[in-house]
Image (cartoon, grey):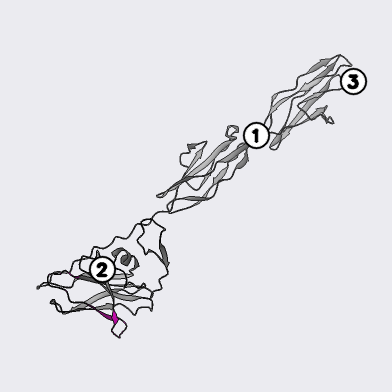
Amino acid sequence: MRVVDTEGQPFPGTGMSLAVMKTSAPPVAISCTGQTPEYPTSSDPITVTMTTNQAKSVEERVYLRWSNDWFITSQIIEASPGGDGVTYTATIQPQPDGNSCFYTVLTSTADLTGYTGSGIIDDLTLAVNGIFNALPTPPPSPTPTPIPTPAPTPTPSPPSITTQPDNKTVNVGQTARFRVTATGTPPLQYQWRKNGTNIPGATNSSYTTPATVAADNGSLFSVIVSNSGGSVTSNNATLTVRTPPTITTQPADKSVIAGQTAKFSVTATGTVPLHYQWTKNGVNIAGATKASYRAPPTTAADNGSLFAVVVTNVTGSVTSNNAILTVR
């Protein structure tokens, strides 16, 4: 399929047409095989013979293109078939003495007979063969060698992330693995970052952290994917590191007069939420589920009781030291 600007518009997309070219498989190649007469005079029409490398499809046409101004403008003649399916002829009108006249042979699926502008003709050409001097001066000059058009270098496709890194939650001491999926012209390069800083050696499509510590909680991990066409940065993935509870302030012993209450408190850290369960002499106290516990008015029987608290979260639990209640 070929997109053609048939009106020579200066801006892309204006006056554009879409042509679907059906050709033989592969499209035919074309070559010039001779001209008659070899050294024409001003009264001689010039007949050019050309040959295709295979029988062409119905849609393909064979043309003779000639010009007096080195193809700034062109004259197009559709060639006549010779009957064998591969040989064709076309005739250039007689040329005045001193005129320059050059021609080439080509194939196209378009009707080129109405065009004179070289740009449109070039756009619609499938196969072309040489530039030939129709009026050589004996001895004939060498046929100019056409300058081959270098094959265009494909434009690389920049990377695009199709699967972003996911957030991860681990317990302290575990590792976390982040992954990304990206497309684009290979090779793709990867550079993982932690809190915006490149991680040395983290240059694959996945990255596994070292064993995590509490300080890693809340860290942001991202990756830059790059190739010859550009680069793209992923979304941030958040690392959550869960830590088991740790008691930083133990319950203190209490001494009260009979009839007074006693309040016990604990301070703990760890991944929230933290849950508390106070015990008296090893037995859970109903409803005593906060960081502090106030005993009811004491009696002599409470003297020497042991109070402790179990602190738990999603990763584990810890039991405080016993606090002794003295009732005077």
Q: Is residue 296 above or below residue 57?
A: above
Q: Earlier in the sequence, mark 1 or mark 2?
A: 2
Q: Crowding near pointer 2: few (<14 within 10 Å), some, many (20+)?
A: some
Of residue 51 and residue 220, the one placed in the foreground of this image is 51
**Residue type at tag 3:** Ala
Q: Looking at the rendering, in which quadrant would you find the N terminus?
A: bottom left
Image quarter of residue 114: bottom left
Q: Is residue 327 above or below residue 126?
A: above
For the point 87% across and 21% down, the residue is: 302
Q: Which mark is residue 301?
A: 3
Residue for badge 2: 74
Name the spot of residue 152 as percent of width and height, x first: 33, 58
Vertical arrangement, residue 11 with respect to residue 124, above or below: above
According to the image, label 1 marks what residue? 243
Query: Is residue 176 inside the magenta stretch?
Result: no
Q: Which of labels 1 and 2 is toward the front?
A: 2
Q: Are circles 1 and 2 on residues that touch, CB within 8 Å?
A: no
Residue 301 falls in image quadrant: top right
Q: Which mark is residue 186?
A: none
- Could you tell me which residue is drawn at 84 percent across and 20 percent down? 304
Measure the C-alpha gap from mark 1 to mark 2. 82 Å
Mark 1–mark 3 distance (CA, rounded to whole Å): 39 Å
Mark 3 nearby-residue class (10 Å; few <14, some 14–19, many ≥20): few
Q: Is residue 30 left or right of residue 241?
A: left
Q: Main secondary structure of the magenta part?
A: loop
The amino acid sitting under disc 1 is Thr
Task: Give the CA distance from mark 3 to mark 2.
Answer: 120 Å
Q: Which residues are magenta?
A: 79-101
Q: Residue 208: horizontal and vertical position, in percent?
A: 54, 43
Judge whether residue 100 is colored magenta: yes
SS at circle 1: loop
